[in-house]
Amino acid sequence: MVVYFAAAFAPLPPLATYVAAFAFGPMLAIGCAGLFYFLINDDFSPRVTIATVSGVAAGIMLLLMLTVQQSSFATMEKHTGTGNEDIKAGYKYITDGLNSVHFGMDIAWDILISIATILYGYSLLKKTIYWKVLGIVGSLLGLLLLSFNLYHFPTPPESAGSIDWGPFVAIWYIVLFSSITSLLLRKKVFKAA
């Protein structure tokens, strides 16, 4: 999750921004695989498997979307510096077409991560009160992300001037992964004592 915020908000040089952005999808996929093992003991159901498959697919789709987006931007940037207005207009049409490709991938990624978030949240209801509250919040955020993306399709909500629930879902995953890490560290400390 740190790479998400580094890529989105930190003033990094271009290469570091690419590394952070391109690492986010694979790291999310690995994190979702870890969530499977955290949840499966309390909720041995297809729901956990579906959430994990959706989460891993979301991570892959995010990597695909970001690499297509950034390669399109880089390629078009090379060619838009010409002084000829007709050529600039032509490149604008091409850029709009390319943007529709990565917008579609962006919505696919949001749908997949929404499904994973809703189902992971529901699975957390099988645990103690802290996890239940976290689960309810996650399921609601996932549902909002999914609803807003479907309502504004084919344009991503933020491009349509609406609310992008993605950063809120990212914060939820940060809290979830941090809580699990804290729990595992406490168990390790108590075992060692």
Image (cartoon, helix red, strand yellow):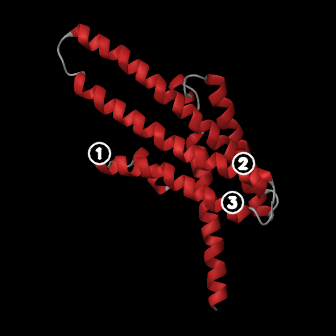
Determine which residue is flagged by label 1.
14
Q: Are marks 3 and 1 in contact (CB under 8 Å)?
A: no
Q: Earlier in the sequence, mark 3 or mark 2?
A: 3
The Cα–Cα distance between marks 1 and 2, rounded to whole angstroms, is 36 Å
The Cα–Cα distance between marks 3 and 1, rounded to whole angstroms, is 34 Å
Residue 146: give x, y in percent of width and height: 67, 35
The Cα–Cα distance between marks 3 and 2, rounded to whole angstroms, is 10 Å
Identified by mark 2, the residue type is Ile
Identified by mark 1, the residue type is Pro
Q: Does residue 12 appear to the left or right of 113 in the view shown?
A: left
Assign a secondary structure to mark 3: helix
How many C-alpha atoms fall within 10 Å of the one at disc 1: few (<14), some, or many (≥20)? few
Residue 32: give x, y in percent of width and height: 62, 55
The image quadrant that residue 72 belongs to is: top left
Q: Are marks 1 and 2 in contact (CB under 8 Å)?
A: no
Q: Earlier in the sequence, mark 1 or mark 2?
A: 1
Q: Earlier in the sequence, mark 3 or mark 1?
A: 1
Tell me the number on the disc at residue 50.
2
Residue 12: give x, y in percent of width and height: 32, 49
Tell me the number on the disc at residue 36.
3
Q: Does residue 55 appear to the left or right of 25 in the view shown?
A: right
Between tags 3 and 1, which lies in front? 3
| Residue 148 appears in the rendering | yes
State the residue at coordinates (62%, 89%). Answer: 192
The image quadrant that residue 133 belongs to is: bottom right
Residue 117: give x, y in percent of width and height: 68, 47
- Pick the quarter of the image with the C terminus: bottom right
